[in-house]
Amino acid sequence: MKLDIRFHPLYMVVSMINLLKGAFIPFILLFIIQLGNQSFIWVAGRYVFVAYIVFSLIRIFLIWRTTTYRLEEDAFILKKGIFSKTRTTITYRRIQNIQRSTSAFHKLLGITSLQFSTAAASSASSVIDIEAISRQEADELEDFVKDLIGDLQSEELAESELEENAVKQKPTQKIYFEATKKQMIKASFTSLRIFIIFPILAFIINQGSELFQMEDVFEEWFELIIASYILLAIVIIILLLLSVVIGMLTTYLQYGRFIISSDEERIYIHRGILSEKSFTIQKKKVQGLKIKQNILKRLLKLSEIRLVNIAQQDEEEASEATNSLYPFLENKEGKRLIKQILPRYFVEPSLQKLPKAAFYTHLIQVPYLFILAVIAYFIWSFSFWWAIAVLVYTMIARILQYLFTRYALEGEFIVYKTGVWSVEAYVTRRNNVMEVSVTQNIFQRLFSLATIQISMRAKPAEIISIEHVPITFAQDVLHWYEQREVQLVEE
């Protein structure tokens, strides 16, 4: 396949729909709310809006016309640019993650989008985005790239004589997790989407009273409802039921059909009903695990397991759970899943608590937030009780952080858990650690404590900071890290 290929023509339709979505609010403001306003700024705004729409439509066509991709024998090539041409070349052996995204409009039009990224995916030159392609072509292209990567890896093994006369078999894909209805219900409550109706309702009332002068009508309705306890109870019940239904529906649309499957080389994640997303992650590129729990998840014994990956996308996509397993996994289910799909990261160490000296070190640190509150008190003269509340909050947070912090060294693994209201745990192997540093402040030296900073190989860089651990443990970590080079040579 060496021909230059354009995106699917329906790329222009999807781009125009996205353009209209972004222009909807300015259109309402300029041509409906302020239509009768003939002041210069609003009249000029209408002309600028129309010119912007026309320019954007022309630009969409030119982008489709000038953007092409091509598959060479050993590399993926993307060319784009209307006036300034850009050529991106990525060799197949560098491709680490494959992501498929199918929005509601994509699904309606029968197309999808593909993204191939490398370890340096934060750079635009290390990502190939095919923004519109038919589903059949996407399947063929994804299989083609995966097969090529597999062939290249097999050649490397043969050249290094690790597996002589080995017969290459296509790895079999097995489903290890599929979200159930019960898990969907738990997810809707944990994600707090059941309360989404209240800000929506407040927005409708606020905008309706301004646009249609219905403020008096809303006030009459409100007075009528609060005048009767029975009517008030009925309205509250209806709103709660409606909010639960909306919360469950939005959660189901985003996380429905959530499937995690795996073979010997990759992890496959598929989620979504209305808008579908699929991710492919190479197991050997996983550098560690990050396990997150907020207060509600701790109460319900749920957790989110994220894969620390050297081929993550930018921070925005990383926060969108690009490398996250199901965000509402039961703790037991999460352990089972890790044991099955990433056995080399499955560990159940005996976690150690911080020493009592760390408790005092937490408390005697300078309360900067309280100092700022006191300064604000002298400037704005509000009640001093607010500053006291800030101090109490700071002390409670420090006590909770002391109680929740755990750490352990277990063979090749280092495990760390910390947090206040939200708790995070990290698991990584020695070979994935790039740097270890140990520091001591004046208070830590008094109690023979230290802070350990561990830099992990990831994109973006992942840094773990373990505060107020015994100096003996810090020395053990340094010695543990020093064995890394010896082991790399042995491997």
Image (tube, rainbow, N blue to C red):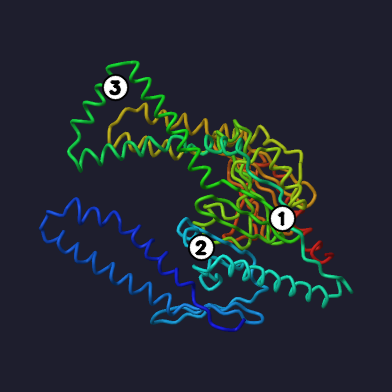
In this rendering, the answer to whether 245 lies above or below 51 is above
The image shows residue 253 at horizontal and vertical percentages of 51, 46
Mark closest to the chain's N terminus, 2 or 1: 2
Give 123 or 131, whichever is nearer the viewer: 131
- 109 to 222, vertically: above or below: below
Q: How crowded is mark 3: few (under 14 residues within 10 Å), some or many (20 or more)?
A: some
Residue bearing the label numbered 2: 110
Extreme residue toward the bottom, this view: 2
Question: Seen in the image, is 7 located left or right of residue 377?
Answer: right
Q: Nearer the viewer, residue 426 or 203?
A: 203
Q: Distance between the residues labelled 2 and 3?
A: 48 Å
Residue furthest to the top: 229
The quarter of the image holding the N terminus is bottom right
The answer to which quarter of the image holds residue 455 is bottom right
> Which residue, as the protein is rendered here, is positioned at the far left?
38
3 or 1: tag closer to the N-terminus:
3
**Residue occupying image coordinates x 35% and y 16%:** 230
Indicate the secondary structure of the residue bearing disc 3.
Answer: helix
- For disc 1, the marked residue is 262
Q: Position of residue 278 (x, y in %)?
A: 59, 57
Vertical arrangement, residue 402 with respect to residue 72, above or below: above
- Mark positioned earlier in the residue sequence (2 or 3): 2
326 or 261, nearer to the observer:
261
Residue shown at 51% from the left, 31% from the top: 395
- Which residue position is annotated with label 3? 225
Q: What residue type is labelled 3?
A: Ile
Residue pictured at 53% horizontal, 79% vertical: 5
Task: Tell me the amino acid under the disc marked 1.
Answer: Ser
| Residues packed near mark 2 inside 10 Å, few (<14), some (14 to 19) or many (20 plus) | some
Where disc 2 sits, the SS reads: loop
Calculate the distance from the C-alpha at mark 3 to the C-alpha at mark 1. Answer: 55 Å
Marks 2 and 1 sit apart, C-alpha to C-alpha, by 26 Å
